[in-house]
Structure formats: C-alpha cells, structure tokens
Image: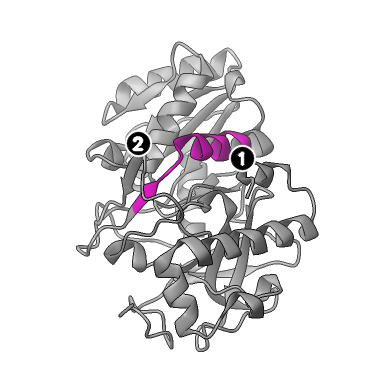
Amino acid sequence: MNIQSIFDINTASEFESMALEVFQFQYQYNALYKAFCSHLGKLPEAVKRLEDIPFLPIEFFKSKKVISGSPDYEVVFSSSGTTGGTTSKHYVTSLDLYQQSYLKGFRQFYGDIEEYCVLALLPSYLEREGSSLIYMVNDLISKSSHADSGFYLDEHASLHTKLQQLDSVGQKTLLIGVSFAFLDYVEKYPIKLQNTIIMETGGMKGRRKEMIRTELHDILKRGFGVENIHSEYGMTELLSQAYSQGNGIFQTPPWMKILIRDTEDPLSLQKPGKTGGLNVIDLANAYSCSFIATQDLAKCNADGSFEILGRFDNSDIRGCNLMVI
C-alpha cells in the first residue's frame, strides 16, 4: 500500500478505491479492528463499497492500543480527559504523515503558512503533555517564519498589543485558540480586527458553561470585530482536520470524508440533510484506524460539507454493544 497516494486523491472514485485498500490493510494488520469487523460479520470479501466499511467506536482509543502494521510508534498523543473519564491515546507510527496531513490541509483552505503570523491562545493544552493540537500549532508557528509568532498562556494584555500592531500594518495573522480563552480575552480586551483570522478549536474544558455555536460565535464576532469566526475540527484520534471558514460549515481535505449514521441503528447511514452520529474516514490514519464512529451529532450536506450539532448524551454507541472485544 502506497500511503503517500492519499494526498493525490482528486475524485470520489479515487477516494473510495483508496479507502477500500486501506480497509483491507487494516483488516489484515490490525487485530482489534479485524475482531470488531468479524463480530459484525463484515469480512473483507463482503466490503465492496464505501458504505460497507465498518466504523470503529472511538471509545476503543481509551481502552485499547489501536495500531495497524508495525507495533512500533514515534509518539503517543493523548486527549485532555477533562470529563473525568479515561483519556484516549493515539499511537502514531509516522509523524511525517501527520505533518503532511495538517500542512497540506491548511494550505488547501488558507494558503501558504509562511504568509501568516501565527498566534495561539491554548492555555488548557499547554498545561499538559501529549496534545496533538499543540504539536500541530507549534509546527505551524515554526513554519510561519514570522518573528512574532508564538504561544500565549494568560498574557492577554501583551496579546492585545501584538494583535493591534500586526493588524495595523496589514500582516495576515492567524489567532487560534480554545473557546473559553477567547471569551476571557474579549471580555477584557475587545478589539476590531481586519487582517486577522480568528479560529476556535472548540471546548470550554470545564472552565465555562457550554454554549451553542451561534451564541459563542456571535460573542466572539463582536469581541474581535470580525465578520466570521473560523473553526478547526480535529481530535486526538485523527491525523487530519476539517475547517470551517464561517457559519459552522466544515469542509474536509480530499483524503478525509464524513458519513452520518442512524442514531438508533449505528450500522445504517443517513442521507444528506439528516441528523445522526458522525462517522469519519481519515485516510491519514492508515497506521491506526481510518474508520471511526465519533460521539458527535452532525448533519452532512450533499456537497460533503457538514455541521456539528452536539454530542451524544450517553457515552455508549447505541445499539453497538461490542466494547468487550
């Protein structure tokens, strides 16, 4: 399997062909995924279409070592575990593949990283080890080559000064941050920006009360004086990201695809426009699992874009009691 070819995908048929090849590889070389598929009766000869591929419940990343191929790995990324549960762990065989994925994905939606000054307001992530988001943002900061690029913890005053300076000279700037930190900032330092992309990565991390996206974005649009709030959709268990450039509508790079499952029958898929559980195909996850059933509720549009509508109330994937594998 030539995993590099995922970055050459241009059409839906090329994606399906590569996804089926990755499925065959992971069925053969991932004992956990093979056992899961076997319990469902999904043997390789029965998987002939994209819709036939089984999606592994994301909870397995909390209790099992999800790895395909060689047992060796370069790094282990872990989730924050702020909900009090067990953290997820992603054993990454190839950091180079991760780097290619986020750099090529960023370039597709935002252009050359070297044109940006990258500022990060990610206190909850900086305060722990093993964050894949911190790894990505740190690399974006490094590759931006701008002298002022960097992380901010709680230095809101100095961040405010820096944003004013950069914006006043027309410097393209990306400010990426977690939702609660953005809210803390705009309460003290409202600003009006013209050359800055505000990108939230979601989550209150237990620091503030959760709020719906439209309410959050309205506050942030007023606080930063911008027309749109951008968003990044990623997670510990994925090596690719989807991006929203406004209104909460996310788009994926060509090697990533979203499918929506029925909340009552998780082995059935919903048609575009219907709400259900979000299934992710991330072909950059070739050496872990590329087919993941998340706990997010979402709606997919006919053009492949999608919206995140919330999360499952319960932690179990309804109707799929296979966690004993």
> Hey, what amino acid is under mark 1?
Gly
Label annotation for residue 105:
1
Please give left or right for residue 257 compared with residue 150 in the image.
right
Colour scheme shown: one colour
Extreme residue toward the left, this view? 84
Looking at the rendering, the stretch of residues picked out in magenta corresponds to 90-105
**For the residues carrying marks 2 and 1, which lies nearer the camera in this image?**
1
Image coords of residue 184 (percent x, y): 31, 41
Residue 291 seen in this snapshot? no
Please give left or right for residue 52 compared with residue 120 in the image.
right
Label annotation for residue 238:
none
Q: Is residue 180 magenta?
A: no
Q: Which residue is mark 2?
A: 185
Task: Kindly report the secondary structure that dominates the magenta region of the rendered protein.
Answer: helix
> Hey, what amino acid is under mark 2?
Tyr
| Few, some or many residues within 10 Å of mark 2 (<14, 14–19, 20+) | many
* Residue visible at 42% across and 55% down in the picture: 237
Residue 111 seen in this snapshot? yes
Closer-to-camera residue (192/9): 9
Give the mark, 2 or 1, whose residue is nearer the N terminus.
Answer: 1
| Few, some or many residues within 10 Å of mark 1 (<14, 14–19, 20+) | many
Image coords of residue 301 (percent x, y): 70, 66
Image coords of residue 264 (percent x, y): 50, 88
Image coords of residue 4 (percent x, y): 63, 41
Closer-to-camera residue (186/281): 281
Q: Secondary structure at mark 1?
A: helix
* Residue visible at 37% across and 36% down in the picture: 134
Up the image or down, 282 lies above or below 138; here it is below
